[in-house]
Image: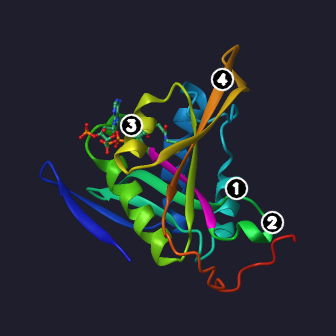
Amino acid sequence: MSQAANLRERTVVIRPAIESDLVAINDIYNHYVLHSTCTYQEAPEPIEDRRQWLHRHGERHPVIVAEMGGCVVGWGSLSPYHARSAYRRTVENSVYVHHQHHRQGIGALILGDLIVRARHLGHHALIAGIDAEQIASMALHARFHFKKVGHFKQVGFKYDRWLDVIYIELMLDNSLNDRPPARQGAPSA
Ligand SMILES: CC(C)(COP(=O)(O)OP(=O)(O)OC[C@H]1O[C@@H](n2cnc3c(N)ncnc32)[C@H](O)[C@@H]1OP(=O)(O)O)[C@@H](O)C(=O)NCCC(=O)NCCS
């Protein structure tokens, strides 16, 4: 599945990530590791760890990229929310847009695409944990009707200060029917 959108006369293609995107994905992310509280990671992600992360994301947990003019300018992913089996239809999303390409509609394209994929894959609940200072991320998710479900106080400590995390959730499917999901790698029971 891939989609293209024309943002202010520039075509942005959303497509599944492949191995050759890893350096761009990691560079985009590591900027925020070093300069932002949007991730609580404090040391840059090594490329080998990023490679393993991509391989861990199977069919039910896609990684996508936004490509503009041949460059990866953002990425998003759906990750298992928890390894225990009864959480199998709950996923956590991540969205990162290159810091020089903010406010061009790329984050909205990525998140919109992730929501569509999550629905198609039969996931039921989509969760995001967002640092309380991240106005942009909160506003982006609010646009897609995520609702606040929790506020954890002072669970992070970065740049010499305590940080709060706000949990937000989007219900993807109102059915009570827990259709058996496609078999996946063996999570612990
Ligand atoms: C959050 C982030 C992904 C938004 O990406 P983006 O491409 O700049 O967002 P978009 O241009 O698609 O904006 C979509 C909407 O989000 C909201 N938004 C985005 N940035 C905002 C900001 N700085 N302040 C207020 N609202 C903002 C607006 O409602 C915006 O719609 P509008 O431009 O029509 O007003 C980007 O700022 C980012 O990568 N931040 C660092 C990483 C991060 O926090 N990721 C989320 C962790 S899951």
Q: CA distance from mark 4 to mark 2?
A: 27 Å
Q: Please indicate whether residue 113 sits to the left or right of residue 150 in the image.
A: left
Q: Which mark is residue 184?
A: none
Q: Is residue 140 left or right of residue 6?
A: right
Q: Are marks 3 and 2 in contact (CB under 8 Å)?
A: no
Q: Which residue is mark 3?
A: 139
In the displayed orientation, state which residue is furthest to the right. 189
Q: Report whether 13 appears left or right of 94.
A: left
Q: Quadrant of the N terminus?
A: bottom left
Marks 2/1: CA distance?
A: 26 Å
Q: Are marks 3 and 4 in contact (CB under 8 Å)?
A: no
Q: Which disc is residue 48 wearing? A: 1
- Closer to the chain start, of discs 1 and 4, is 1
Task: Indicate the colouring scheme.
Answer: rainbow
Residue 163 - label: 4
Q: Nearer the viewer, mark 1 or mark 3?
A: 3
Q: Earlier in the sequence, mark 3 or mark 2?
A: 2
Task: Count numbered badges in the picture.
Answer: 4
For label 4, the SS is strand
First along the sequence among labels 1 and 3: 1
Q: Amino acid at mark 2?
A: Arg
Q: Secondary structure at mark 2?
A: loop
Q: Is mark 1 within 8 Å of ligand 1?
A: no
Residue identifier under label 2: 84
Q: Which is nearer the N-term, disc 3 or disc 4?
A: 3
Give the residue displayed 66% in from the left and 33% down from the top: 40
Question: How far apart, in angstroms, are the residues tagged by discs 3 and 4?
Answer: 18 Å
Question: Which of 24/12 is in front?
Answer: 12
Residue type at mark 4: give it. Answer: Leu
Disc nearer the start of the sequence (2/1): 1
Per the image, label 1 sits on a secondary structure element best described as helix
Q: Which residues are magenta?
A: 90-96
